[in-house]
Amino acid sequence: MAKKYGLIAKFDTPADIMHAAEKVRDAGYKQWDVITPFPIHGMDPAMGLKRSIVPRFTIVGGTLGFTTGMSMIWFTNAYDYKILIGGKPLFSPMFAFPVSYELTILFSAFASIAGMFIMNKLPMHYHPMLKHKEVAASSDDKFFLYIETADPQYSEESTRSLLESLNPVEIDELDD
Amino acid sequence: MSSQATTSNIAMNQDASLPNPKKWLTIGAIGLLISLVGLISSPIGAYSYLVSVLFVSSIAIGMLFLVLIHHIFDAGWSTVVRRQAENFLSVVPYLGFLFIPLFLMTMKDNGLIWIWMDDTASLHGHGTVGEDVLYLKKTWWLNETFFWIRAIICFGSWAFFARALRKHSFSQDSDGKAEHTFACRKLAAGGLVVVALTWSCAAFDWIMGLEYHWFSTMFGVWFFANAMRAALAVLVLTCTYLVAKGPLKGIFNNKHLHDLTTLSFAFCVFWAYISFSQYFLIWNGNIPEETFWFNYREEGIYFYIGMFLVFGHFLFPFLFLLQFKLKTAHASARFICCWILFMQLFDLYYNILPSLKDSHGEPYQMFSSPLNFVWFISGIVGVVGILLWAYWTSFNKVKIIPIRDPRITESLNHSH
């Protein structure tokens, strides 16, 4: 007996799903999502999504990269095995800068990808939507909105009646 | 025709609350007159005048670059801000006139600004310019005739492209022909090459030429980065001002602002990249022919100005413009743009003033006399007055946005 993941509603047009998303947002649901065949401009505010916090990961990664670069050059050239080259100081931020700069970019990129994985709860080996009978239509010409049972506001009757009030083509149950 | 009804409303630019161009002309003329007294009376006054002219040139040519780049990429989003840049282009033909006093002064006193113009000028402890083998090897480029011909080519080509781009854009407002867009695109293809070369030439001749022993291939690109930063800062200030005063309200949206400040951020990094690369290669190469230029810039006040540039012209705007909220709010965007313009001026001082030497062959200290401030401030007030006079004159003559540009709807609806 499969556990129930949530209720899913199907819509025919981008305008319908946009209005539906606004109503679900205003009803105060948190654990829900829309699935559309293509990105719909204005969907983020319609769903009440805030700006991504991935940039926070990026700045942490960048700062780490910069300090790693600086300290690595200091450690290798001025501390662990002192080498005097061309009469230059053993350590200077000047020649450590190109390395630090590259590591800033590299670590920023790694941190951004890691941040994206964390925020998206990846890796996710499957999504309940994949078991839905019309999963193929969701990447063709149909628009879906589901509300998870995990949502604190979820209740069998009120959630179903909310979805019905959005005039979907069809409401279905989504198994986990 | 409902579209024409709305466009005629947009064309109502004259507004009592907006500045009067004549007021700015008066301010500019007074500033320039005082600055010209400085040019005639002392070398620091002459250098200060050069800084002022290059400051306004970098804003104007930065605008020219922005318009050319807009056309070469067939950009959509920037159509509504392009008109303000075109208004600023009206100052470009006057830049050459601002340069004439420098020409006249060097005719009177050859080595006043560019020391190589005077064969008899003595180099501290190394004879005269005329006996200097490093100068003799460079005479094919650094001779007065060729120097002034290059200046005429620079100002002439900038004026040509500025006028042509403005003419096509304004004609399109009345006849709505797509040919103007195609003509601008062709102008941009040639113009970018010509302006890139002439602008580098300007950097080499007018700034690097002050210290003719020194050479850096980065210098033209450094000047380009500065011009772009200055122009973007002025453009953000103008657009946010026009939103606050009404003309661009509801037209210039937060997404346009975000894009302009993002470009500002990009050129902040670009400026740092170029400036650092120049310093780093010279530091690493460590040969006296190149390092002496930076040695002069570590003496006295210039050391602190250099450090101020590293942290104030790069690190602070970098961290500031990283933040989405600060980039997209009008007040904070205005603040950082004023800051960038201020730092841009210091960058010019840092690159130009130490080339002026005192009687001991040491770089002339920028703040050595209170009188210097009179020349610094009057020069900047003068050129900014001329810039704003040209801007508001043009602003009152033309429509607030290019209403019949093929991409204007796309730009008005720019939101993603």
Image (tube, coloured by chain):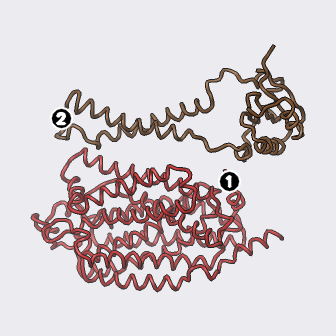
Chain A, chosen colour in render: brown
Residue A123 picture quarter:
top right
- Residue in front for this viewpoint, B46 or A29: A29
Question: In the drawing, what numbered circle is on residue B415?
Answer: 1
Is residue A117 depicted above or below A45 in this figure? above
Q: Amino acid at mark 2?
A: Leu
Q: Residue at x 62, y 58 (%)?
A: B254
Q: How many marks?
A: 2
Residue A21 picture quarter:
top right
Residue A75 image point, x, y percent: 27, 31
Is residue B166 depicted above or below A87 in this figure? below
Residue B337 horizontal side relative to residue A151, left or right: left
Residue B273 image point, x, y percent: 39, 49
Chain letter belonging to callout 1? B
- On the question of residue A139 being in view, the answer is no
Q: Residues within 10 Å of mark 1 (few under 14, many from 20)?
A: few
How far apart are the two marked residues, 2 and 1, measured between alpha carbons?
Answer: 56 Å
Task: Quarter of the image for the C terminus of chain A: give it.
Answer: top right
Q: Amino acid at mark 1?
A: Ser
- On the question of residue B28 being in view, the answer is yes
Residue A93 horizontal side relative to residue A158, left or right: left
What secondary structure is marked by label 2? loop
Q: Residues within 10 Å of mark 2 (few under 14, many from 20)?
A: few
Chain B, chosen colour in render: red
- Residue in front for this viewpoint, B10 or B128: B10
